[in-house]
Amino acid sequence: QVQLVESGGGLAQAGGSLRLSCVASASIFGFNTMGWYRQAPGKQRDVVATITSGGTTNYVDSVKGRFTISRGNNRVYMQMNGLKPEDTAVYYCYLRTLGGDSWGQGTQVTVSS
């Protein structure tokens, strides 16, 4: 199974920016989707943004205009601007291929008001 390793989380002030990165342990072949989910304390894990191998992107409404997802073959990034306290969560990298799903270990993002 492909391993995913995230980096780039941390502490930011409201209105600030962070950039998340995720690298897969192997090249990825075939149609696939990479993306980011997040889980706040006491809440379920929800999708934030996804991008297919063809470049099609989708965002949850709450981050549209603030977050931008991009990718290479085996890596995905998310530029987060205009951060809000409600963006505070553990962010998980995600990969879906025909062979199944893989998750990263998560990286904490904390936004102070």
Image (spheres, grey):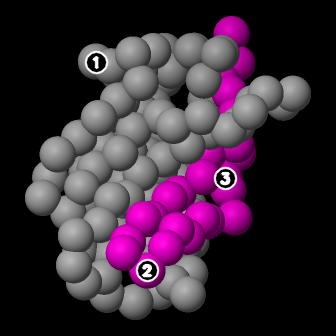
Label 1 crowd bin: few (<14), some (14–19), many (20+), radius 10 Å: few
Residue in view at x 39 percent, y 38 percent = 49
Which numbered dot is residue 65?
1
Which numbered dot is residue 99?
2
The amino acid sitting under disc 2 is: Gly
**Of 8 and 105, which appears nearest the observer?**
105
Q: Residue furthest top?
A: 113
Residue in view at x 55 percent, y 87 percent = 1
Distance from disc 1 to disc 2, alpha carbons, whole Å, reads 32 Å
Residues shaded magenta? 88-113
Was residue 100 drawn as part of the magenta stretch in this picture? yes
Distance from disc 2 to disc 3, alpha carbons, whole Å, reads 25 Å
Q: Is residue 19 above or below residue 110?
A: below
**Of 100 and 5, which appears nearest the observer?**
100
The amino acid sitting under disc 1 is: Gly
Secondary structure of residue under mark 2: loop
Secondary structure of residue under mark 3: strand
Q: Residue furthest left?
A: 54
Secondary structure of residue under mark 1: loop
Residue 108 visible somewhere in the drawing:
yes
Distance from disc 1 to disc 3, alpha carbons, whole Å, reads 22 Å
Give whichever of discs 1 and 3 has the lower sequence position.
1
**In the rendered image, which quarter contains the C terminus?**
top right
Q: Is residue 78 above or below residue 77?
A: above
Query: Which circle, 1 or 2, is nearer the viewer?
Result: 2
Label 3 crowd bin: few (<14), some (14–19), many (20+), radius 10 Å: many
Q: Residue 108 at what x, y percent from top left?
A: 70, 45
Judging by the rendered image, the residue that carries numbered circle 3 is 107
The amino acid sitting under disc 3 is: Thr
